[in-house]
Amino acid sequence: MKYLVTHILSNEERKQYESKGLYCYDLRDSDFGNDIASIEKRVCVNRIGSMITNKEIKLGDKYPNDFVDYSDFTLKNKEVNTIEELLKNNRNKNKEAR
């Protein structure tokens, strides 16, 4: 899976990215400075930024397991620098499906 860490996305930005087949998540601050602790669907308190991915992250369905540890996630997945890099494989899949 590929991911892009970015600024806190507005609802409008989320809708735009999700309409292109991408997935948007919020990032929670670790309470120990500017470190990212977790990836969640929505964060109201201690939100430090957003993450956009090319595939869905399987989150738990109930509190307190409704998040993914940021460090574990980044060790297993590839960070990219642009939205275009996230969309690249999605475009190829759409072409193959036609």
Image (tube, rainbow, N blue to C red):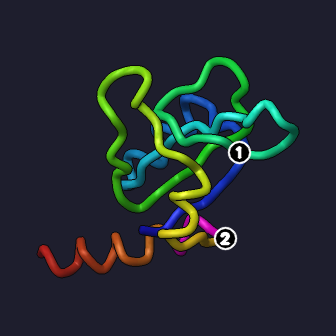
Residues rendered magenta in the picture: 81-85
Q: Are marks 1 and 2 in contact (CB under 8 Å)?
A: no
Within 10 Å of the Cα at label 1, are there few (<14), some (14-19), or many (20+) other Cα atoms?
Answer: some
> Closer to the camera, 32 or 78?
32
Picture coordinates of residue 73 (x, y %)? 51, 58
How many badges with numbers are in the image?
2
Residue appearing at x 61%, y 72% in the figure: 80
77 lies above or below 41: below
Residue appearing at x 54%, y 46% in the figure: 69
Q: Secondary structure at mark 1?
A: strand
Residue appearing at x 61%, y 56% in the figure: 71
The amino acid type of the residue labelled 2 equals: Asn
Task: Answer whether residue 54 is magenta in the image.
Answer: no
Picture coordinates of residue 1 (x, y %)? 41, 68
Q: Is residue 19 left or right of residue 73?
A: left
Q: Earlier in the sequence, mark 1 or mark 2?
A: 1
Residue 36 circle label: 1
65 lies above or below 3: above
35 lies above or below 32: below
Residue that numbered label 2 is attached to: 81
- Residue at the left extreme? 98
Picture coordinates of residue 28 (x, y %)? 66, 34
